[in-house]
Image: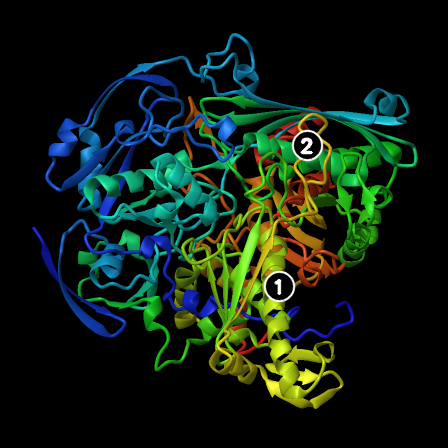
Amino acid sequence: MEGREFTVVGKKLPRIDALAKVTGEGRFISDIQLPGMLYGKVLRSPLAHAKILDLDISNAEKLPGVKAVVTAKDSPRKTFCIYPNLANNLILQDTKVRYVGDQVAAVAAIDENIAEEALDLIKVEYQELPAVFDPEEAIKSSAPRIHEEENNVAAYIKRQFGNIEDGFARSDVIVEGRFKSPSVAHCCMEPRGCVASFDLSGKLTIWSTTQTPHSLRQELAEVLDIPINRVRVMSAYVGGAFGSRMFMDPIDAIASLLSRKSGKPVRIVNTREEEFISSRTRYPMIIELKTGAKKNGKCVVRQAKVITDNGAYNNLGSSVTGNACSKLCQLYSVPNIKFDGFVVYTNNVYGGACRGYGNPQITFAMETQMDEIAVKLGMDPAEIRLINANRPNTITVSGCEITSCGLTECIEETIDRSGWKMKKSKKRKNCGIGMAVVMHGGSGGKFYWGDNCHISSAIVKMNNDGTVDVLTGSKEIGQGSDTVLAQIAAEELGVLLEDINILSGDTDATPPCGGAWGSRQTFTAGIAVKSAAADVRRQLLSIATDMLEARIDDLEAKNGMISIKDYPEKAVPISTVASVSYTHLGTPIIGKSINNDPWSSTPDPVTGFGNVSSAYSFGVQVAEVEVDTDTGIVRPVKITCAYDLGRAINPLLAKGQVVGGTLSMGLGYALTENLVRKKGKVQNISFLDYKILTALDICDIECVFVETNDGRGPFGAKGIGEPAMIPTAAAISNAIYDAIGVRVKELPITPERILKALKEKS
Amino acid sequence: MKHQIRLNVNGAYYDLLVDPRKTLLEVIRNDIGLIGTKMGCNCGECGACTVIMDGRAVNACLILAVQANDKKILTIEGLASGGKLDPLQEAFIDYGALQCGYCTPGMIMSAKALLYKKSSPDRGEIQESIAGNLCRCTGYISVIEAIEAVIKAEKRP
């Protein structure tokens, strides 16, 4: 495989959905319009913590144009969470609300204005309860209880590897610090939404902005108490997800209830305000980190106490904290580790997956401290990273098997390309340069839960004219997975990209797949698609043996032809072989494959030991900044990135992931983004007040790939989506220190925080 | 009371009876059925609904349909002609200037309005022209490069 010339893989090919998207033809969820469709609106709690004493919907039901009003009474009242043992949320609340935005009732009407009006007619009598918003307050025994549990600790994750006492005793330098990261909104340009339609037979068809269609199908079947085959999650374009649309949102189930009750299709699309108030957020963490290193720069011990604001209900807080722990154990392969992670309920909106999944939080802390150690030892921050860099074919103390690893090469690339050495030696006033690295799963990861989320499967059908249908349960959410998976199929089959028709995400037509999260689709779904295509190729070659009078091992499929190796003139078109098989032999060619990600395992529940991912991706970012010490404004000048993604199946799309991840989510996380809450109510509920970066706020960027050709990945590829944004905040923070000699350990690094740090320094 | 209006959208005339509260965005999407124009915030902050009205880029969610009476509107669907894509559309495809694609129609319309105004804008002017079009996927660089390529009449990256 290594020496092979590729014809489709590795090429900068345009996205296969590009035409639909530049012409406005592409159908997104909010474009789905069905005959007789009603518009749903959700009544949300104005209070952060309250008992529901009475709920009266009678006036709303009487309003002309209203077709259904639902409360918890209309649902089976089943709690939900992707981890059933942690489930404590309901799609509609009836005893208590636990955050501002919690859903208590919903209306479907013939238009949005009537639905809105009907919400005002629903009377809810609340008895306000004391609330708690700061996780460090919520963890205290005196704090108000949010659930009927002993305390507000939703989960405690404890991990210990090696011996930290010994590690610190042997350290020549020790640094300690407290790092805080904010609650951040995903800000998908398409608001979350769905169209749900129950038919008379009781079958639900739903279009949803989900990134996990097969999981959503199971979750809806569960909360609606119907069999799985009575739910069909349809395929449509999704206007961004970034983790926020991983698993079910209450509105998916609420629209379904409204449809069942009204007998009509029902659409619910969040307003932008609802997106900010009630959509998932990145979990905020308070991280107390202590790191010890030897005089030669080798990092020997790390100890972290993490408090994660879980918000009001369980979702992915435990898993995200588990991944933060996992990365603490993995990056630089430190031999002595202690981790205490407290996942704490508060009366804030509950969090969810967000590009990086706990890793941006812990990387900000780890990589800031790496710089502090370099300063204490008088070492170059790049040099200390080279000394500690993970190496290929090594096992971390926590059991992670690192196979391919190009971290050292990535560091060297960024040193060269950024002019690191020159810029470190010739300093300009208030200008600085900083580095941070990332290690992340390049194949998804098993941090906490059971196994059904981790599989991917594919069916590949060859039509009798040589064109191909690829059916996959994966989900295109803008990252380009449809294009990448089609390229993988085309390469494996020896056909052109335009010969591939791909259908992804429709749960009635595609085989199960965990979906789009954890930078897993290129690797995990890619392996499934490649194996299914290989199955088809074998069948084709087998039929061609008679036609070409050759042994199967002597045949190859390439550019639409099957030929004898080294004798390209002895060839037959794939379309002819397909036609013979389909028409004459009566055996249409169908291939299938299931990839259950056999190389990784969920960590041992007691020891935490385990290889959580089948492959690991690596990257480095070098940021250059200018700081105005009068105003505190940080101006990013340039970011130089190098990433080990195994192999870029499509370099155009891979670069798009890195550039977009860095400049939009990475820089925003570093400098501007923060959901500000007052008594649990989000104050910045619009793009005017919640600042994501515009075309005027970005900086130059250079991006290079280090291709390590992973032994397990499809054509050597590993995931790149999440690693793209993870190191940016730390790189910027380290550059700021280089520029003005202060460290801000709370994100985002706002002008106010810079000025405060400068004042404290002087 | 409903109002009678006449819109010229992509060269075709529409005579409509509209509620005075309705925005141009709602009319384009729901009454005329051109769903390429997207709604991202409904308050003029994200630019997903950008269309060109009498030669200028506007947020269709901030214009009441009645204000657009007798105006000439161009939406993303009106850009390609005779089965041929607009050079901006081609460049967006070639430069990978889109991912989820939700902001793309608005982004292209803002760029188009810029090119109506100026034949060879510099990078700063390009950035300025799309500063009101938020994108969470691309980091804008590929978008800027695609627009520059059209200006330089380059074809491929």
Disc 1: which residue: A530
Quadrant for the N terminus of chain A, please.
bottom right
> Which chain letter matches label 2?
A
- The spot of residue A29 in percent (x, y) is 36, 53
- Residue carrying label 2: A325
Location of residue A226 with respect to A89 vertically, above or below: below
Residue A741 in view of the camera: no
Residue A479, given in percent of the width and then of the height, sits at: 54, 56
Which residue type does callout 2 highlight? Cys
Type of amino acid under label 1: Lys
The residue sitting at 22% across, 39% down in the picture is A261
Q: Residues within 10 Å of mark 2 (few under 14, many from 20)?
A: many
Quadrant of residue A78 within the rendered picture = top left
* Numbered badge on residue A623: none
Instruction: Check the image and name the residue furthest to the left.
Output: B1
Q: Give the image's coloring scheme.
A: rainbow
Q: Quadrant of the C terminus of chain A?
A: top right
Identified at 10% across, 39% down, the residue is A64
Q: CA distance from mark 1 to mark 2?
A: 33 Å
Q: In which quadrant of the rendered view does residue A289 lie?
A: top right
